[in-house]
């Protein structure tokens, strides 16, 4: 949904609302699954990245930055699956993607500048794609 919104533009109010609700449900599921001091589900880092990107483009930039930081923490704490080399690559990719989503959120005040707006849009498409 977030990718569709970014491609079509945030004028699709019903879709933005549906995406917000879907992200909230996903977050609730992750919080319910998480037990203190246990590793995070790997997919939780991707949910954080997508939600941070969505918020940075269509919502509150501060919430997007907070969500990106949460995604970085989740990536560090992600559950190990398979070979260690594969896990490291996954964690590094998610760290980078969540950091990029954080940059997207921080750059929102400069979105009125056409070059910045275009670069933000391209980065959002890459993060959501």
Image (cartoon, grey):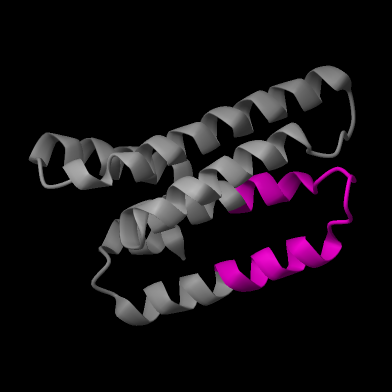
The percent coordinates of residue 124 (x first, y second) are 37, 45
Seen in the image, is 42 located left or right of residue 27? right
Say which of 10 and 48 sits in front: 48
Look at 75% across and 21% down and name the residue there.
Answer: 88
Q: Measured along the vertical axis of the image, is residue 50 above or below residue 120?
A: below
Q: Could you tell me residue 62's position as x and y percent?
A: 40, 52
At x 28% / y 39%, what residue is drawn? 107
- Residue under the image location 54 percent in, 28 percent down: 96
Q: Which residues are magenta?
A: 23-47
* Placement of 25 over or under 76, stated as above or below: below
Which quarter of the picture shows residue 91?
A: top right
- In the image, residue 56 sits, relative to residue 69, either above or below, namely below
Task: Work out whether residue 58 or residue 12 is closer to the camera in this orientation and state it.
Answer: 58
Per the image, is 33 magenta? Answer: yes
Residue 53 lies left or right of residue 23; in this view the side is left
Residue 30 in sight here: yes
The residue nearer to you, when weighing 16 against 30, is: 30
15 inside magenta stretch? no
Query: Residue 123: x, y in percent?
Result: 35, 38
Q: As rendered, which of 16 and 105 lies closer to the eye?
A: 105
Q: In the drawing, does residue 16 fall left or right of residue 24? A: left
Question: Residue at the spot x=45%, y=56% of the render?
Answer: 63
């Amino acid at each position: 949904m977030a990718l569709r919104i970014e491609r079509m533009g945030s004028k699709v109010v019903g879709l933005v609302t549906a995406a917000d609700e879907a992200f909230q449900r996903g977050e609730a599921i992750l919080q319910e699954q998480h037990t203190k001091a246990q590793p995070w589900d790997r997919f939780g880092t991707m949910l954080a990245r997508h939600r941070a990107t969505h918020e940075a483009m269509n919502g509150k930039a501060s919430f997007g930055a907070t969500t990106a930081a949460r995604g970085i923490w989740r990536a560090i704490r992600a559950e190990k699956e398979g070979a260690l080399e594969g896990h490291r690559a996954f964690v590094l990719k998610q760290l980078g993607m969540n950091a990029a989503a954080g940059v997207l959120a921080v750059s929102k005040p400069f979105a009125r500048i056409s070059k910045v707006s275009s670069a933000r849009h391209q980065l959002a498409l890459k993060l959501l794609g």
